[in-house]
Amino acid sequence: MTGVEPDRLDDQQLMKELETIHRTRHDTLLYGSNDALRAHNERMAQLEGEYLRRNPRRLVAANRTREGARERACGGTVAQSD
């Protein structure tokens, strides 16, 4: 692996690393070698895992949940399941 271990990054560095890896994701998928994509996947998983470890109670937008998606699809009403 290249780069600093995610648990050694401060919060600002971690966010910068996450922003960079998400920005480069599409090009790596389309044009990177299999090795490059594998390394990208591994690094992204490590960085995202560290972010989630540090922020277990992060804000989750209601429209980013399954129920919120159903609400959008149904025009504002959520079907109740029995």
Image (cartoon, rainbow, N blue to C red):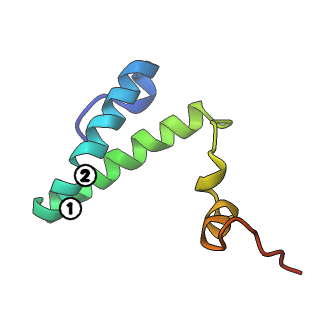
- Asked if labels 2 and 1 touch by Cβ distance under 8 angstroms, the answer is yes
Residue at (78, 75) in percent of width and height: 79
Is 71 or 43 nearer to us in this picture? 71
Q: Can residue 33 be spotted in the picture?
A: no
Quarter the N terminus occupies: top left
Category of crowding for the residue at label 1, using alpha-carbon neighbours closer than 10 angstroms: few (below 14), some (14–19), many (at least 20): some
Residue that numbered label 1 is attached to: 29
Residue 81, position as x, y percentages in the image: 83, 78
Is 26 or 39 nearer to us in this picture? 26
Residue that numbered label 2 is attached to: 25
Query: 40 left or right of 18?
Result: left
Residue at (66, 73) in percent of width and height: 74
Query: 15 left or right of 34?
Result: right
Residue 41, position as x, y percentages in the image: 31, 54
Q: Can residue 37 be spotted in the picture?
A: yes
User: Hey, which quadrant is residue 70 in on the image?
Assistant: bottom right
Vertical position of residue 26 compared to residue 47: above or below:
below
Residue 5, position as x, y percentages in the image: 36, 31
Is 7 or 63 nearer to us in this picture? 63
> What is the C-alpha distance between the residues marked 1 and 2?
6 Å
Instruction: Say which amino acid is labelled 2.
Output: Arg
Q: Which mark is residue 10?
A: none
Residue 30, position as x, y percentages in the image: 15, 64
Query: 18 left or right of 70?
Result: left
Q: Secondary structure beneath disc 1?
A: helix
Q: Secondary structure beneath disc 2?
A: helix
User: Hey, which quadrant is residue 19 in on the image?
Assistant: top left
Vertical position of residue 42 compared to residue 69: above or below:
above
Residue lying at the far front of the rendered structure: 75
Vertical position of residue 8 compared to residue 36: above or below:
above
User: Hey, which quadrant is residue 8 in on the image?
Assistant: top left
Residue at (45, 43) in percent of width and height: 48
